[in-house]
Amino acid sequence: MRDELVIVGGSYAACEIASAARSNGYDGNVRIITEEPELPYHRPPLSKAFLLEESNEIGLPLKSEAFYRDNKIDIEFNVRATRIDRITSTVHLFDGRAINFDKLALATGARARRLAIPGADLNGIIYLRSVADARALKREAANATNVVIIGGGFIGLEVASALVQQDKNVTVLEMQPDLLT
């Protein structure tokens, strides 16, 4: 059986792990498993440049399709890992499949903290984590006059800045006494 490096997550780290494996001579199978339908992409522009249309989706991917093809890096899109069995060296997927690995890297990144308040499931509430979220935010913002952003961290303030530049009335709510804490 041939070596297999399985990378769970479609983040910047996933792209770099796969790239580094190849550039350092790893000749086994390299497979990235990602829940997203997109090639790994730059996330920082999603909170401002993408919303201001200074960046388009063409510039978001970290590497081209040709890079993955030429380096024999397989990507499985729209796939979620549900369980890792370290004893059998197996990653179990949501669709019932299991993938054996010799090497495993977890590169899932972070998730947006979900609101735990009544009304958190109403229409118009958007969490910014993925390019799909950024598209939804851009669509919703186009018709909005007033916007409330919960979170005064870097991403929340970048979104606030982009929306103010689009003449939206923006209120930022932050539970800490200072922004960016």
Image (spheres, rainbow, N blue to C red):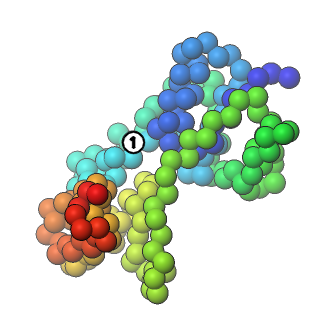
Q: Residue at x 45, y 61 (%)?
A: 112
Q: Secondary structure at mark 1?
A: loop
Relative image position of residue 149 (x, y in whole percent): 29, 71
**Residue type at mark 1?**
His
The quadrant the N terminus occupies is top right
Q: Residue at x 29, y 67 (%)?
A: 176
| Residue 149 in sight from this viewpoint | no
Q: Which residue is mark 1?
A: 42
Relative image position of residue 128 (x, y in whole percent): 40, 61
From this view, report whether residue 52 is shown above or below residue 138. above
Within 10 Å of disc 1 (Cα), the crowding (few <14, some 14-19, many 20+) is: some
Q: Quadrant of residue 178?
A: bottom left
The reply, left or right, for residue 17 in relation to residue 125 is right
Q: Residue at x 31, y 71 (%)?
A: 175
Q: Nearer the viewer, residue 109 or 42?
A: 109
Relative image position of residue 132 (x, y in whole percent): 45, 58
